[in-house]
Amino acid sequence: MSRLAVHVIVEHGGDGVPFGCAYIRDLLPLGHPANAQRIALTASTDLQAADVVVVERTLLPGATVLEAEALVRRVRRNGSRLAYTLDDNLLDAPQIPLPTRTVARFLCREADVVLVATETLAGRVRHLARRVVVLPNALDERLFFAGAAAAAPPAREEVRIGFMGTWTHERDLMLLVQPLREVLRTHPGTRLEVVGGADPALLAAFEGLAVRQVTVPAAEVEYPAFVRWLRRHAQWDVAVAPLEDTPFTRAKSDIKFLDYGALGIAAVCSEVPAYAGTVRHGENGLLVPNDPAAWAEALRQLVTQPDLRQGLADNARRYVAAERTLARRAPAWADALAALF
């Protein structure tokens, strides 16, 4: 059987570099060796002829409905099928501009299939779409597991807590200001490291405590390079994954837990839908209500119990390696597109 020609119009920034979600949701799974006999993949920032054209999230920076309509017409003239990938509830979030929400709604209606990351998101778009397929996020083992296995953090007196996120996750980090301040103050050998953007005013809340913001070098921002950088630099004992419980966040995935697990780090996660189906409390991570006292207690447990930390980290890494890598999951992407013919 001949391979499907699949072209991805990548979501990107002003520099043309694909966003991380473009790699996670499209480029890496569709281009994975597991699909080499089924998919011939191309990608760019514009349309090319293909059996299937994949468009992502907001289509292009600042795209309008008129631009989306024009693109769909070109896709149809070429006789291509149209797949739309969505990993966030862009339809409802009030913080997302109305034109962007309108583009997302339009593409949900026009696509031959909408590929989403969670069942919750599928439920939100199903009444709009012709067909919806849930493809849970999975990590590329070539990036996260190639080479030496993740080692336990080096022996040291200091316990490092890590948080990884862009400026869009600042509200989540705000959930932890009080419990983190308490733990850092009462356990002097503990340090917090924040990777990514954070408002200086937020970091100022930790003044006088052991907190360090880590900036990712510009050359390491593109997703594959970022993962390699993270493996070298995230020498954390504990990682936190706070998440507000809102209509928008309920459609989010467990990607942060997967990242931490693959890195061999014990994770504390908010007890919200994104993590409740994956994190087994006390076995491969800790699930904590969004309550300052509960978070402080969970952090104290991990800061003071190295054996618990290591057990959670080992189990999380085993779970990701066994269940949530593209070696296991990537064929589902090819299946979803093949079903269009």
Image (tube, grey):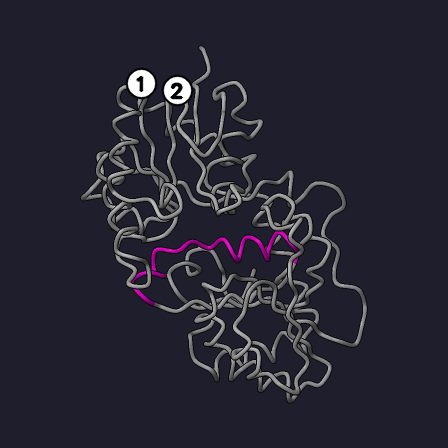
Number of numbered tags placed on the structure image: 2
Q: Is residue 66 above or below residue 313?
A: above
Name the residue nearer the viewer: 67 or 49: 67
How would you rate the neighbour count of disc 2 (Cα within 10 Å): few for under 14, some for 14-19, many for 20 or more? some
Give the Cα distance between marks 2 and 1: 7 Å
The quarter of the displayed image where residue 72 is located: top left
Q: Is residue 239 above or below residue 22?
A: below
Name the N-terminal-most of marks 2 and 1. Answer: 2
Q: Position of residue 82 (x, y in %)?
A: 31, 29
Q: Residue furthest top?
A: 1
Name the mark on residue 327: none
Q: Residue at x 53, y 29 (%)?
A: 31
Name the residue nearer the viewer: 99 or 337: 99
Q: Position of residue 58 (x, y in %)?
A: 35, 45
> Circle 1 sits on which residue?
78
Contact between marks 2 and 1 (CB within 8 A): the answer is yes
Kind of residue at badge 1 = Asn
Q: Position of residue 49 (x, y in %)?
A: 39, 20
Residue 247 within the magenta-colored segment of the rendering:
yes
Residue range highlighted in magenta: 246-264
Left or right of residue 259, residue 104 in this image? left
Kind of residue at badge 2 = Ala
How would you rate the neighbour count of disc 1 (Cα within 10 Å): few for under 14, some for 14-19, many for 20 or more? few
The quarter of the displayed image where residue 160 is located: bottom right
Task: Label 2: state its secondary structure.
Answer: loop
Residue 250 within the magenta-colored segment of the rendering:
yes
Q: Residue at x 22, y 34 (%)?
A: 130
Q: Is residue 78 above or below residue 307?
A: above
Task: Label 1: state its secondary structure.
Answer: loop
> Circle 2 sits on which residue?
49
Q: Specify the quadrant that holds the C terminus.
A: top left
